[in-house]
Image: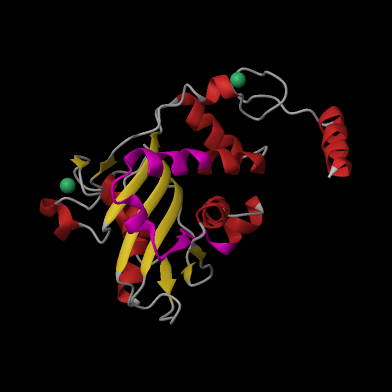
Amino acid sequence: MWISSIKNFLLDLLFPCFCVSCGKEGEYICKDCLSTIEILEYQFCPVCEKRVIDGKTCKNCQQKTKLNGLFIAVAYKNQLVKKLINQFKYKPYLKELCPILCFLIITHFSLIGNNTMDILKQGILIPVPLHKKRQKERGFNQAEEIAKHLSVKLNLAFCNNVLIKIKSTSAQVGLSSEQRKKNIKGTFVCEKDDRIKGKKILLVDDVYTTGATMEECAEILKQAGVREVWGIAVARE
Ligand SMILES: [Zn+2]
Ligand SMILES: [Zn+2]
């Protein structure tokens, strides 16, 4: 044990880390800065964005979405959260930020309380996949890293390579909601696999923007025989 603390001590000495927000040495985000992030205490409907009480997509919107419900930990307009996500998924690719992003999600789960554990129970975590070309460029899939970490922390099953992105999409930035939907159509496939048939899927992504990506994934998963799809993301734009 003391060997590993000495090792960590030496690593910190040689490669010190700094808070991405205030620059204080010691942690990637210091406790003071972390405590300024407002974590959402409620769930909102994926379609109309109204607050929902039981966590489920509201009755009026159930026909318009394949998502049974959606968990979003924080608002993306929070500049610090934006910074954390950007430094994680773009250069310098600070993978050490993944546990912090997961901490935001897990705190969100505990803040909503109620039936959250019932919803998550026996769920299978599946990341929104990247096209293999994009994943090769980045070296990892940020949604997969988050899903894997959540799986360890929450003791939930994790399943990869069943939902696959077969076509790369041009950047979604600047597109309208309708254009995004069109852009993403037909870019995912899902095998009819016993691991997911009749199961509850917890679909994980880093940022939820218009929902076009999660919506398309949810539709493909349900076509493959999945029973329920719940979205989980760190932030909503
Ligand atoms: Zn700080
Ligand atoms: Zn609604």
The answer to whether residue 88 shows anywhere in this view is yes
Marker count (numbered): 0
**Residue appearing at x 35%, y 47% in the figure:** 71
Name the colour scheme.
Answer: secondary structure
Q: Is residue 15 left or right of residue 205?
A: right
The C terminus sits in image quarter: top left
Whole-percent x, y for residue 73 in the image: 40, 39
**Which picture quadrant has residue 234?**
top left
Q: Which image quadrant shows ligand 1?
A: top right
**Residue appearing at x 66%, y 19% in the figure:** 23
Nearest the viewer among 33 and 187 is: 33
Q: Where 44 falls versus 221 (above or below)?
A: above
189 drawn magenta: no
The N terminus sits in image quarter: top right
Stretch of the chain drawn in magenta = 103-132
Whole-percent x, y for residue 205 in the image: 45, 51
Nearest the viewer among 179 and 17 is: 17
Q: Is residue 230 left or right of residue 99?
A: left
Q: Where 33 falls versus 43 (above or below)?
A: above
116 drawn magenta: yes
Whole-percent x, y for residue 116 in the image: 33, 50
The answer to whether residue 173 shows anywhere in this view is no
